[in-house]
Amino acid sequence: MLEFLHAVGQYRFLQYALLAGLLSGVACGVVGTYVVTRRISYIAGGIAHCVLAGMGAARYCSTVYGWTWLSPLHGATVAALGAAAIIGVVSLRAKQREDTVIGALWAVGMAVGVLFIARTPGYNEDLMGYLFGNILMVSGRDLLLICALDVVVVAAGMVWYDQFLAICFDEEFARLRGVPVEWFYLLLLGLTALTVVLLISVVGVVLVIALLTLPAAIAGHFARTLRGMMILATLLCALFTVSGLALSYAPNLPAGATIIVIAGAAYLVTASFRAVLRTR
């Protein structure tokens, strides 16, 4: 731990990584709470795996056409929002086909991303970096984009807090009160898509759902209100991120995987402890 703290003071890439983890934790706490409460983690998984197509396409265009301003996070944002829109419309209009569409987008998104990366000439980032995260490679430009997405996600989540609360717990009551449930459901999926983009920089495509849901699931065991659950989930996500970075630094382990192992262990301990208390 001391070695990591000393290195943070010396190396800018570690400072960027730490900031990326802390900033992503804010949106993770807010949106992750909605995802866990609304039980749409499987939809978030479908969105996450479509993101690779956008990242691969952005990298391809940047290299082949010289669009140096286009970063993988830009492509990820477009792909995530597109996938959220498709899944949301299908979920609202044809629920019986929802799982099929999610599975198709999940597989096709990954495949398209792999194809774009394979066709990109020259040196490409390792595909494992996209799949399992490479928080140590976050740039200053990526941090600005993460900040912008963070502001959008948190602002929307707090401004429409009551509406999201209603559709998460009692959709029919929300309709009776005149809340446009379909619109807010699509907006929630859009916020989930943006949060997925944030977390991909931290833990990658494969592990993003764990970081989106585990802190909120742990917070749900202790918080009495949805707002309290958000705050606790945000703090837990920040704790897991910083701990994962610190523990992975000296032995040179993958930071994203280390973060998820810590979060998973914390969830298992919490769930087991609660189960023991209920049996007494």
Image: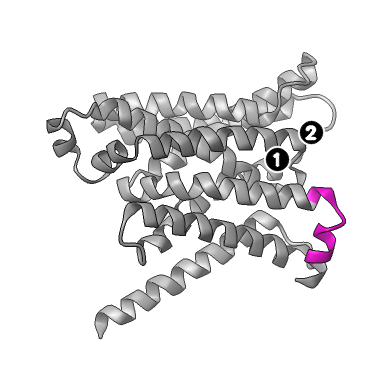
Which residue is at the far top? 65
Q: Residues within 10 Å of mark 1 (few under 14, many from 20)?
A: some
Q: Quadrant of residue 52?
A: top right
Q: Is label 2 in contact with label 1 (beta carbons under 8 Å)?
A: yes
Residue 217 visible in the displayed image? yes
Regarding mark 2 in the picture, which secondary structure is present there? loop
User: Which x, y percent locates residue 88?
Assistant: 35, 28
Between 108 and 211, the one nearer to me in the picture: 211
Q: Which residue is mark 2?
A: 124
Amino acid type shown at disc 1: Leu
Residue 115 visible in the displayed image? no
> Is 9 included in the stretch rendered in magenta?
yes
- Report whether 132 appears left or right of 272: right
User: Which x, y percent locates residue 24?
Assistant: 58, 46
Q: Identify which residue is drawn at 26% across, 78% down.
A: 278
Q: Main secondary structure of the magenta part?
A: helix
- Report whether 9 appears left or right of 160: right
Amino acid type shown at disc 2: Asn
User: Which x, y percent locates residue 171?
Assistant: 20, 38
Stretch of the chain drawn in magenta? 4-13
Q: Quadrant of the C terminus?
A: bottom left
Q: Identify which residue is drawn at 14% across, 37% down.
A: 172
- Report whether 133 appears left or right of 176: right
Regarding mark 1 in the picture, which secondary structure is present there? helix
Q: Identify which residue is drawn at 47% across, 23% down.
A: 82
Q: Which residue is mark 1?
A: 127
Q: Identify which residue is drawn at 62% across, 25% down.
A: 75
